[in-house]
Amino acid sequence: MLDATNLECVRGNRRLFKNMSFSMRPGDLVQLIGPNGSGKTSLIRMLCGLLPPTSGEIRWRGTRISALGEEYYSAVTYLGHRHGAKDEFTALENLRVSSGLSGCEITHEQAMDMLTRVGLNGRENLAARLLSEGQRRRLGLARLLVRQTSLWLLDEVLTSLDEAGAESIKLLMVEHLDKGGMAVVATHQELDLSVNNFQRIELAS
Amino acid sequence: MFRWIVWRDLMLAWRRRTDALSTLFFFMIVVSLFPLSIGPETQVLRSIAPGVVWVAALLASMLSLGRLFASDYVDGTLEQMLLTPQPLYLIVLGKVLAQWVVSGIPLILISPLLGVQLGLSHQSLLVLAASLLLGIPVLNLIGSIGTALTLGLRGSGVLLSLLVLPLCIPTLIFGTGAVEATLISANPEANIYVLGAVFVLTMVFAPWATCAALRISLE
């Protein structure tokens, strides 16, 4: 499904990694670990297609992702460092707008339901600027639930989540992998998930 | 999808309506400075009116341009837009359309009032509004390329002006040309047609360039 071959990443005049190869099949989980500045975010952004690799290639179902374009994006959800929520919008509006933009419109009731599932009940009509850091993360998680794509690219997704929040994202991940989904997760924390196909990729500094 | 992006940007502008108002007041103040500094001779004012209103409109739209992508870039919604399964072209077009509604239409609506202040006749006022109606979207579209290129740079405001203002010169010439034609009782149609052609051309090509610039800026 997703094959990365001989990826190399150069940022500025520093080479972050080279000869990075791995492939993923349905149900696979890849955890990226490494110190700050070792290229975890860069690798995830490459897998998104936001950052073209310095050399090497990434293929999705056998086709280069740069050639697939929008078709690839309908199979991918990316949660980055930045939350992707507008401060001026409420949690509910944020979710509905981002869903609408990604082509899967949801009704008011569906959005309320998703927000309850990620633990934001009672905060639906609060402007995002009033939400805490962890609550904004949860808002991002709601996007994963709405879009139901097969590949999740999660960058530091556990940061600033409380224990219950971290547990629920792990549950979501296990559920997703069981259904044949795939996930790439960059995180410092131990994931200790009970999944079969678990690869760890260590990035050296 | 297109509906959502336009709705989103209009709603955001409504929640930050002081931004749009400040653009409008900037436009009104710049135009009003000319009669105060040059003096009240109607003949002089009327002859410089087309240029004054057009240059002020150009500067006012430059002022609002910086906001087109900046806040979306900072909070990460822009990278999410790049990763939607919809064409980025439509997203850019939707954002520029919303920008035009928010900061362009008020300028067009207030321009006849400012024209009266500078002694323009009834026919000149109509042509002035028509030329701005076609010209301001062109300025927004060209500006969107510049904004996308300078995203995340320090001092991007000045750089943006340096990049975009020269590209706006043709629009400025034909826009003022149309209004000036009415001053000497000539036919302004030719200029308006050229403006229309420039508008159609930029609407087709500028979003495409903006998309490419956005992809580069977000690397």
Image: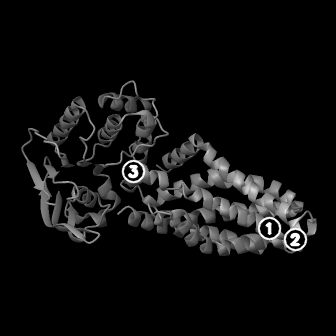
- Between discs 1 and 2, the one toward the N terminus: 1
Q: CA distance from mark 1 to mark 3?
A: 41 Å
> Same chain, marks 1 and 2?
yes
Q: Secondary structure at mark 3?
A: loop
Q: Residue at x 73, y 70 (%)?
A: B175
**Which of the two labelled residues, at mark 2 and mark 3, occupies the earlier sequence position?**
3
Contact between marks 1 and 2 (CB within 8 A): the answer is yes
| Residue A166 falls left or right of residue B94 | left
Residue at coordinates 46% horizontally, 34% vertically from top-left? A127
Q: Residues within 10 Å of mark 3 (few under 14, many from 20)?
A: some
The residue under label 3 is: B76
Residue at image point 25% right, 41% down: A159
Amino acid type, residue under disc 1 in the picture: Pro
Q: Chain of mark 2?
A: B
Residue position marked by numbered label 2 in the rendering: B183
Numbered disc 1: what chain? B
- Identify the image quadrant of the C terminus of chain A: bottom left
Q: Which residue is mark 1?
A: B50
Chain for disc number 3: B
Name above or below for residue A109 compared with residue A48.
Answer: above
Q: Residue at x 86, y 75 (%)?
A: B186
Above/below status of A76 relative to A15: above
Q: What whole-number distance in Å separates the C-alpha atoms at marks 1 and 2?
A: 9 Å
Q: Nearer the viewer, residue B181 or A191?
A: A191
Residue type for callout 3: Gly
User: Compared with residue A103, is residue A108 higher up or lower down, i.e. above or below?
Assistant: above
